[in-house]
Amino acid sequence: MTDIRVLHRKWMEEPAYRSAYDELDAEFELAHTLIEVRSRVGLTQEESTERITSEASPRIEQGMMPHR
């Protein structure tokens, strides 16, 4: 069985894969930061999701969140 890291390095040589991977860089960084902060403050994924949702919902409904 081939290690996923070996496959990833090989695939990164392909321009289409590299481009798609690079486009996701900001999302990977955000996910990493969220996991790091959540772990630091001792929240489970569920607790973190509940807090984010309860704080973001009113802002989204009021149009205060940036649109993608």
Image (tube, rainbow, N blue to C red):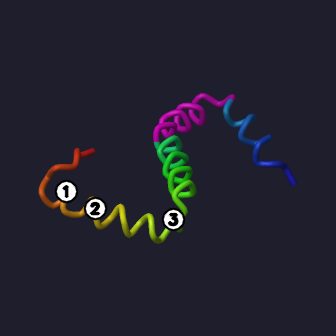
Q: Residue at x 35, y 61 (%)?
A: 52
Judged by depth in the image, the label closer to the viewer, 1 or 3, is 3
Specify the farthest residue to the front: 41
Name the residue beneath numbered marker 2.
Answer: 55
Above or below residue 18? Residue 40 is below
Q: Main SS type for the magenta part?
A: helix
Name the residue beneath numbered marker 1.
Answer: 59
Q: On residue 6, which mark appears? A: none
Secondary structure under badge 1? helix
Q: Nearer the viewer, residue 30 or 40?
A: 40
Q: Quadrant of residue 55?
A: bottom left
Above or below residue 40? Residue 26 is above
**Residue 2: x percent and y percent?**
84, 49
Magenta segment range? 13-26
Q: Residue at x 29, y 67 (%)?
A: 54
Q: Nearer the viewer, residue 46 or 9?
A: 46
Between discs 1 and 3, the one toward the N terminus: 3
Specify the farthest residue to the right: 1
Q: Is residue 53 left or right of residue 40?
A: left
Name the residue beneath numbered marker 3.
Answer: 43
The amino acid on which the numbered mark 1 sits, given as a three-letter code, is: Arg
**Residue 31: x percent and y percent?**
51, 49
